[in-house]
Amino acid sequence: MAKKKSGGIAIPFLVTIFLGLLIIGGGAFWIYNYLGLNKSATLTEPTPRAAATVSVEDNHTILLILDEPEQKCSSTFVLMRSKPIEKRVIFIGIPTNTISIIDGQQEHIQNSYDRGGAQGAVNFVNQTFGITVDRYIRFDSASFRKVCDVLGGATYFVEPDIAGFKKEGGEEYLNSRQIETLITYPMFNGREVQRAYTASSLLAAMLNQTDGKRVADNFRTSFDSIINMVTTDITAVDYKNRQYAIRNMLEYGTSIANFIILDGESSNDDFIPSESFLESIRTAYFGD
């Protein structure tokens, strides 16, 4: 009796295994798809960094104080309101003999400063103007001249017969030393009111006449140099938060600076600011 070939059993056996694998594999594949396991873990794009923008949050107010006892002159006070979102800066000259009622008592800004330092002057301005001064900068001769050199001086009208300038008066280019001399000049006919006007208008002229792009390009270097020469409560965080807005304003703004001298009444040696004028300033420049 002839033997049967073993291949007759092997082939059906292999076919059975193949069909089993196909059925099992197909079921597994269906389950795999059904459960979503075949979805590859795609790499999501990182959240892009928000582009730098300018907003009302970049607006700020700084009290500028020039203190040079060696000049035999009272301190100089100028309030600087910066509004980068509008690309403008407002300088408000505050006569040194300005008086106000502070904590129930009549007070001069100079006396507030003499007793309480820069913060004392800030408190005076806060209560007198009804605003919030964010920071202060106090300059001495060297630091003030440095700022003037960074901005590049200014062409400005000078009255006749002021020592160190054209005898006949008129417009002339002023370097840092001359700007300092004029701002601290104690013998104006209009006394401290005229000196406050001169300080605020000269700062505005200097800012408007500077090369904004050049200042913006060198802003970090200039800031680091000046900030180490002055007394201030401006911090590195303040710089980081507002540097883009300030640089943008300097580079793309045109004639960004304006100046205001307080309206008020002079009585003896005192200057009393007009409350209605202060209200108009608050509405126009501080009502963010």
Image: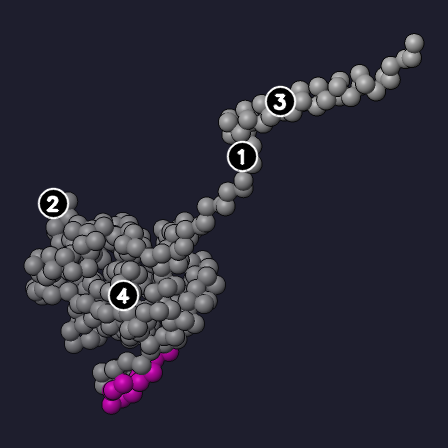
| Mark positioned earlier in the residue sequence (1 or 4) | 1
- Numbered disc 2: secondary structure: loop
Q: Which numbered mark, 2 or 3, is in the foreground of this view?
A: 3
Three-letter residue code for mark 1: Lys
The residue type indicated by label 2 comes to Gly
Q: Which residue is mark 1?
A: 39
Closer to the chain start, of discs 3 and 4, is 3
Residue 243 figure quarter:
bottom left
The amino acid sitting under disc 4 is Arg
Spatial CA span between label 3 and label 4:
77 Å
Q: Earlier in the sequence, mark 4 or mark 2?
A: 4
Q: Which mark is residue 23?
A: 3
Image side of residue 254 versus residue 227, left or right: left
Q: At 81% from the left edge and 18% from the top edge, which residue is drawn?
A: 8
- The residue at which mark 4 appears reads as 88
C-alpha span from label 1 to label 3: 22 Å
Which residue is depicted at the point 18% across and 54% down? 287
Residue hosting label 2: 104
Whole-angstrom CA distance, mark 1 to mark 4, is 55 Å
Nearest to N terminus: mark 1 or mark 3: 3
Residues shaded magenta: 164-176
Q: Look at label 3 and name its amino acid.
A: Ile
Identify the residue at image location x=46%, y=67%. Answer: 218
